[in-house]
Image (cartoon, rainbow, N blue to C red):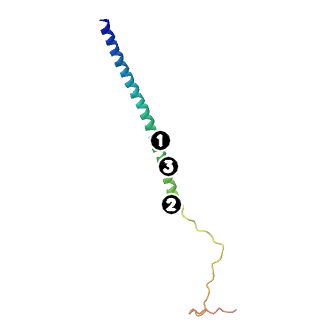
Amino acid sequence: MAAAAGKKQTRVEKERTRTYLARQEFHDGLIARRRRDNLIAGAAGGLLILAVVGGQIAYYTMGPGAPLPMPTDSSTPAPTPIELPGSSEIPAPTPTP
């Protein structure tokens, strides 16, 4: 009868070892999945931030948020028109004082 008890003990130990290894493998799988999920979430978050910043830059430089061009004051006088020979316009006489 002692031999039967030893076989039963061995079977229980094998089952316990198998269960322990299965739990370890499951736990290692959870850790790997969390690490992968964190990496994917970080990459997606970084892309989202880049898209938002790019959108803001595009909006304020090219879109409706762009500042309107301000007229500049030119200090040079406007050019006087040049009369070409043979033009049909006759200049008005200037009165002499």
Residue type marked 3: Leu
Locate residue 96: give its quadrant. bottom right
Residue 50, numbered label: 3
For mark 1, give the secondary structure. helix
Q: Nearer the viewer, residue 65 or 49?
A: 49
State left or right for residue 83 relative to residue 19.
Answer: right
Residue type indicated by callout 1: Gly
Q: Crowdedness of circle 3 by 10 Å Cα count: few (<14), some, many (20+)?
A: few
Residue at 62% across / 86% down in the picture?
A: 82
Horizontally, residue 69 falls left or right of residue 20, namely right
* Dot 1 crowding, Cα within 10 Å, few <14, some 14–19, many 20+: few
Label located before the other in sequence (2 or 3): 3
Q: Nearer the viewer, mark 1 or mark 2?
A: 1
- Extreme top residue here? 1
Where is residue 53 drawn, in percent x and y?
51, 51
Cα gap from disc 1 to disc 2, whole angstroms? 30 Å
Residue 84 sits in quarter: bottom right
Relative image position of residue 90 (x, y in whole percent): 59, 93
- Packing grade of label 2 (10 A; few <14, some 14-19, many >=20) is few
Q: Residue at x 41, y 25 (%)?
A: 24
Answer with mark 3 or mark 1, whichever residue precedes in sequence: 1
21 lies above or below 68: above
Q: CA distance from mark 2 to mark 3?
A: 18 Å
Mark 2 vs mark 3: give the one in front.
Answer: 3
State yes or no: discs 2 and 3 in contact (Cβ < 8 Å): no
The residue under label 2 is which amino acid type?
Met
Query: What residue does disc 1 label?
Result: 42
The number of numbered discs placed on residues in the rendered structure image is 3
Asked if labels 1 and 3 touch by Cβ distance under 8 angstroms, the answer is no
Q: Which residue is mark 2?
A: 62
